[in-house]
Every structure is written in structure tokens, then in C-alpha cells.
Image (cartoon, rainbow, N blue to C red):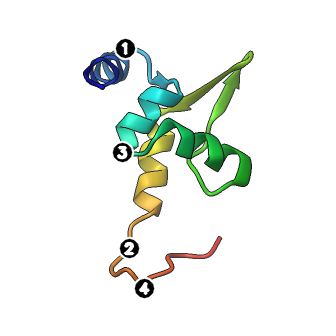
Amino acid sequence: MDDEATRAARAKKGSPFLNTAQAAFYVGLSARTLEKMRLTGGGPRFRKHGRYVRYHIDDLDAWSLGEQRVSTSDAGETP
């Protein structure tokens, strides 16, 4: 896990693109959860670079901000 954190921090300083494992660590989810969200929707925006899935840090931050709630019963905004 520390390796992923180090790689994510280094990526943020250099390239703004994270792979699934790095993006999952960045937002505090499992890689599997992000993979499921790619299939079902509702997750952060992602990009395909060839056969590789990449998440831009700005997209992760924007998605996280959109997930803000004031209570557990708050359903959030509807798209």
C-alpha cells in the first residue's frame, strides 16, 4: 500500500494520470470498486490510453466534490 501511495504522490507531481490502483488509493476505495463503477457508472470519469485505463487527478477531485453529503439520508444531486 505504501508503494501505491508513493507512486500516486509522485504521479501527482509529474503526470496527472493515475492507473486504477493509484486512483483507488487516492480516493480511498478499492481498485475493484473503481472497476465496478466503470461498468455500472456513478464513478469518476476515466480515460482510455490505448488499452490502459487512466484517471486524471482533476477528474478524481471533481468526482469526490460531487459526492459531498450533509447527512447519511442525503441522496445528493440527481444528474
Q: Which residue is mark 1?
A: 14
Q: Which residue is mark 2?
A: 69
Of pointers 1 and 2, the one earlier in the residue sequence: 1
Alpha-carbon distance for marks 2 and 4? 9 Å
Badge nearest the viewer, 1 or 2: 2
Observer able to see residue 57:
no
Of pointers 3 and 1, the one earlier in the residue sequence: 1
Vertical comparison of 12 with 64: above or below? above
Q: Residue at x 51, y 42 (%)?
A: 59
Q: Nearer the viewer, residue 35 or 26?
A: 35
Residue 1 position within the rendered picture, expressed as x and y whole percent measured from the top left: 30, 26
Secondary element type, mark 3? loop
Of pointers 1 and 4, the one earlier in the residue sequence: 1
Residue 34 position within the rendered picture, expressed as x and y whole percent measured from the top left: 56, 43
Secondary element type, mark 2? loop
Secondary element type, mark 1? loop
Q: Which residue is mark 4?
A: 73
Residue 57 position within the rendered picture, expressed as x and y whole percent measured from the top left: 44, 34
Label number found at residue 60: none
Alpha-carbon distance for marks 1 and 4? 39 Å
> What type is the residue that disc 3 sits on?
Gly
Is 43 situated left or right of 28 in this image?
Answer: right
